[in-house]
Amino acid sequence: MPLHIELIGSLAAVITTMGWIPQIIKIVKYRDTASISLVTNISLALGVFLWLCYGIMIASWPVMAANGMTLLLILTILGLKIRYG
């Protein structure tokens, strides 16, 4: 894969993955998860897990890194939802 394409994919991965951090900060700060959908986040976690599997199968580092990190962040949100739910 050409470097410029990998860079675009990597940048997209960083931006979309970091989008979960403000949600985690807000949950921790206010200890409120009433507006967080458990079903939606479980579905997202499953989808991201499958994207991670796909990234491993095609050996794409941007796909693996982004979805590995995103999965950790979504699982953090799920853990907080269960704790504060």
Image: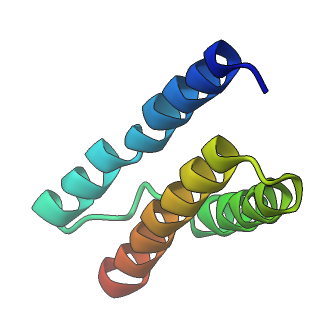
Compare residues 4 and 72 and report the one nearer the observer: 4
Q: Position of residue 35 (x, y in %)?
A: 42, 55
Decide: is 22 above or below 59.
Answer: above
Residue depicted at x 87% and y 52%: 58
Q: Residue furthest top?
A: 4
Decide: is 41 above or below 62.
Answer: below
Q: Is residue 17 left or right of residue 59?
A: left
Q: Is residue 79 left or right of residue 65?
A: left
Q: Tag count in the figure?
A: 0
**Residue 80 falls in image quadrant:** bottom left
Q: Position of residue 43 (x, y in %)?
A: 73, 63
Q: Position of residue 63 (x, y in %)?
A: 68, 46
Residue depicted at x 79% and y 27%: 1
Q: Residue furthest front?
A: 2
Compare residues 77 and 4 and report the one nearer the observer: 4
Q: Residue furthest left?
A: 29
Residue depicted at x 25% and y 60%: 27
**Residue 15 falls in image quadrant:** top left
Q: Residue furthest bottom?
A: 83
Compare residues 1 and 23 and report the one nearer the observer: 1
Residue depicted at x 62% and y 42%: 62
Decide: is 5 above or below 53.
Answer: above
Quadrant occupied by the C terminus: bottom left
Q: Is residue 55 left or right of residue 18?
A: right
Decide: is 82 above or below 40.
Answer: below
Q: Position of residue 54 (x, y in %)?
A: 85, 57
Q: How is the image coloured?
A: rainbow
Compare residues 57 and 2 and report the one nearer the observer: 2
